[in-house]
C-alpha cells in the first residue's frame, strides 16, 4: 500500500522531514522557531522540532473546528472504516515508526519500540469497530411521549501526550475521539515528537483534512495556549502530577471536561502461596525495567511475604543481572536509556537518598554499557531498594526510573494497609493461588486497575484509570469512549 510514509528511506529521513513544522489542516506547516531534540543514547542533537506558540496553536484549533461539522455528520461506521484503514497503514510501516521512536526516546527497539507500534495499531483496530455502539436509550416516561437519549460528539479535543509511550497514549486518545465524531489537536512531547508526527501523518492520510492535527512546543508556550483556547471542548492529558494540576485548573476556568492520567506508585503484593517463578517474571515486566521504569503503572513497591523474600530477591537479582543495557538500536539490548539529563538526575537523587537512609541497602543489577559512541549519562542499572521505612520519599514518591522498593511482610492486614498508604491509586497486582485472598485483596486495594497473577500493560478493550492523585477518568474501552468523548442529549417528543 502506498502511503505518506512510503517515500521515507529510513528514520533519519523522517527526522529531517519533520524539522520545525506542524501538521495542520492536512498540510505540513513550517514554524519559524525550533527546539533541539536529543538522542538520549549518544547525547547528540537528533533533529529540531517546532517550537509552537499561541499563534500556531490557535491555527491548529481553527483547522480542527473547521473540519468538525462534516466529520461529525459522517456516519459513525464510515468514520470507523477510516480509522481501521489508518491502523492497517500504521502496522504496515511499523518498523520505520519503531526506528524513529527508539532514536528519540532511548527505548530498546526489540523489547519496547516494536511492541509499542503494534499495540498502537491494535488500538486503532479495536476502536474502529465501535462506531455502531454510539447508542442512546428510550425511556418509558409517558405513553403519549417519546423520550430518548442520543450520543453526540463534543467538538475539538485537545490531546496532550507524554514521551514515555507517546504512540500508545496518543492512539488511546485520538482513536475513540475520532470514531465518536470529534476532531483532534495533538500536542506532541517536545522530548520525543518525531514518531508521533510520523504515526499521526500516516493516520491523517486516511482522514479529511483538519480532522487530526499535530503541534509541538513547550508546555508554557504551546500546551497552555491549547488548554486555554475557547474552542477546545475537551482536554485529555497524560503526564506528571504537577502539570496535570495546571491542565485541570485551565479546564476548570472554562468549565470544560478533562481526563487526567497522572502518576503512580503501584504496589505488588506477593503472598506466601504465590508461584515464585511467575512472580519474578511479573516483577520485571510490571516494573517496566526494559523501559527504564518510565511508566506510571510501574510496580515500584514490591511487598514480598517473609517466607519468599530471600528467594524472590535472589531470583529477581539474577534475572536482572542477565538483562543487557545498551544501544537502543542493538537487537541484543534489553534496556535502553532514561529520556533526558533532568530525569536521570531525579532518579540518581532518589537512589542517593536511599543510600543515606539508616539500615537501607541499595542493590544495583546488570552492567553499564561500554559501546563506542554511547553517552553513559542517561543509562541506569536496575536498582532495588531494601530496608526503607514506609514514609521514606523513595517509598511514597513516583521516581519514574528503574528503581523498585522491596519490602517484606508477614501480616495480611498490615500489608493491605501499607499498599494503600499512598496518595496515588493507579494500579496494583496480587500474586496468590488462593481465590478467596485474591477476591478480598482486589476489593480492598485502592487502585483503579488491579490484576491477579499477571502484570499486563494497557489493553484497548479494558477500562483503565486511577484514583486519587493518579488522575481523573478512564482510558481504553467502550466505556471510556462514551464517557469522555461524547455527550448525552435527552429528547422528549409529545404526541398530543
Image (cartoon, rainbow, N blue to C red):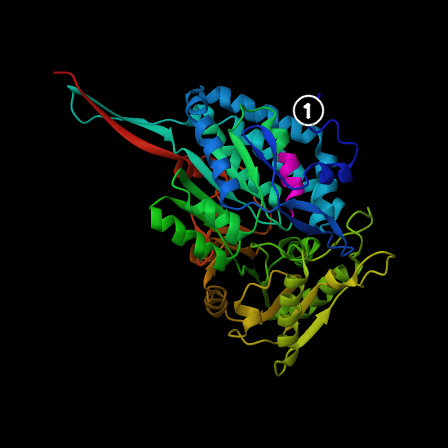
Q: Is residue 224 above or below residue 2?
A: below
Residue 295 shown left or right of residue 237 in the figure: right
Give how far across and how far down residue 334 sits, in percent.
76, 52
What secondary structure is the stretch in magenta mostly built from? Answer: helix
**Which quadrant does the C terminus fall into?**
top left
Q: Is any atom of residue 330 visible in this view?
A: yes
Which residue extends farthest bottom? 358
Which residue extends farthest top? 496
Q: Is residue 11 above or below residue 377?
A: above
State the residue in front, 225 or 150: 225
State the residue in front, 78 or 8: 8
Q: Is any atom of residue 315 visible in this view?
A: no
- The residue identified by callout 1 is 3
Decide whether residue 195 is among the magenta residues. yes
Give how far across and how far down residue 4 sits, in percent.
68, 27
**Which quadrant does the N terminus fall into?**
top right
Residue 327 shown left or right of residue 94 in the figure: right
- What residue appears at the point 49 percent right and 35 percent down from the top-left corner? 184
Location of residue 469 by image quarter: bottom left
Give how far across and how far down residue 230 sits, in percent.
38, 41
Decide whether residue 176 is among the magenta residues. no
Residue 447 shown left or right of residue 331 in the figure: left
Stretch in magenta: 192-199
Circle 1 residues within 10 Å: few <14, some 14–19, many ≥20: some
Location of residue 145 by image quarter: top left
State the residue in front, 399 or 252: 252
Amino acid at each position: 500500500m502506498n502511503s505518506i510514509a512510503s517515500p521515507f528511506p529510513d528514520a533519519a529521513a523522517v527526522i529531517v522531514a519533520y524539522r520545525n513544522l506542524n501538521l495542520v489542516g492536512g498540510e505540513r506547516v513550517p514554524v519559524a522557531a525550533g527546539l533541539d531534540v536529543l538522542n538520549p543514547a549518544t547525547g547528540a542533537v537528533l533533529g529540531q522540532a517546532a517550537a509552537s506558540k499561541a499563534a500556531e496553536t490557535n491555527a491548529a484549533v481553527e483547522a480542527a473546528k473547521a473540519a468538525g461539522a462534516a466529520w461529525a455528520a459522517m456516519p459513525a461506521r464510515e468514520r470507523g472504516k477510516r480509522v481501521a484503514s489508518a491502523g492497517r497503514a500504521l502496522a504496515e510501516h511499523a518498523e520505520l515508526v519503531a526506528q524513529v521512536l527508539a532514536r528519540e526516546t532511548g527505548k530498546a527497539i526489540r523489547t519496547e519500540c516494536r511492541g509499542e507500534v503494534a499495540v498502537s495499531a491494535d488500538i486503532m483496530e479495536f476502536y474502529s469497530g465501535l462506531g455502531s455502539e454510539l447508542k442512546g436509550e428510550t425511556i418509558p416516561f409517558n405513553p403519549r411521549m417519546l423520550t430518548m437519549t442520543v450520543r453526540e460528539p463534543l467538538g475539538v479535543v485537545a490531546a496532550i501526550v507524554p514521551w514515555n509511550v507517546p504512540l500508545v497514549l496518543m492512539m488511546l486518545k485520538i482513536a475513540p475521539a475520532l470514531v465518536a465524531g470529534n476532531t483532534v489537536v495533538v500536542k506532541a512531547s517536545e522530548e520525543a515528537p518525531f514518531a508521533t508526527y510520523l504515526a499521526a501523518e500516516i493516520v491523517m492520510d486516511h482522514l479529511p483534512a483538519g480532522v487530526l492535527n499535530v503541534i509541538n512546543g513547550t508546555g508554557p508556550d504551546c500546551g497552555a495556549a491549547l488548554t486555554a483556547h475557547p474552542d477546545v471542548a475537551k482536554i485529555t492529558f497524560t503526564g506528571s502530577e504537577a502539570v496535570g494540576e495546571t491542565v485541570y485548573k485551565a479546564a476548570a476556568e472554562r468549565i470544560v471536561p478533562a481526563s487526567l492520567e497522572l502518576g503512580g506508585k503501584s504496589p505488588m503484593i506477593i503472598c506466601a502461596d504465590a508461584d515464585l517463578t511467575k512472580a519474578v517474571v511479573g516483577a520485571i515486566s510490571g516494573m517496566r525495567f526494559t523501559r527504564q521504569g518510565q511508566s506510571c503503572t510501574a510496580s515500584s513497591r514490591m511487598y514480598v511475604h517473609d517466607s519468599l523474600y530471600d528467594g524472590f530477591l535472589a531470583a529477581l537479582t539474577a534475572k536482572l543481572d542477565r538483562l543487557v543495557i545498551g544501544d537502543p538500536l542493538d537487537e541484543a539490548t534489553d534496556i535502553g536509556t532514561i529520556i533526558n539529563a533532568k530525569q536521570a538526575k531525579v532518579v540518581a537523587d532518589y537512589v542517593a537518598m536511599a543510600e543515606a537512609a539508616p539500615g537501607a541497602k541499595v542493590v544495583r543489577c546488570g552492567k553499564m554499557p561500554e559501546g563506542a559512541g554511547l553517552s553513559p549519562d542517561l543509562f541506569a542499572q536496575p536498582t532495588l531498594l531494601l530496608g526503607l521505612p514506609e514514609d521514606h520519599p523513595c517509598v511514597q514518591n513516583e521516581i519514574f526510573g528503574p528503581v523498585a522498593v522491596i519490602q517484606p511482610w508477614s501480616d495480611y492486614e498490615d500489608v493491605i494497609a501499607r499498599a494503600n498508604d499512598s496518595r496515588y491509586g493507579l494500579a496494583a497486582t496480587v500474586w496468590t493461588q488462593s481465590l478467596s485472598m485474591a477476591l478480598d485483596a482486589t476489593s480492598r486495594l485502592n487502585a483503579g486497575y488491579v490484576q491477579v497473577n499477571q502484570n499486563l500493560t494497557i489493553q484497548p478493550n479494558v477500562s483503565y484509570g486511577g484514583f486519587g492523585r493518579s488522575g481523573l477518568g478512564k482510558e481504553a474501552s467502550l466505556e471510556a469512549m462514551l464517557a469522555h468523548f461524547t455527550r448525552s442529549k435527552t429528547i422528549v417528543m409529545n404526541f398530543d
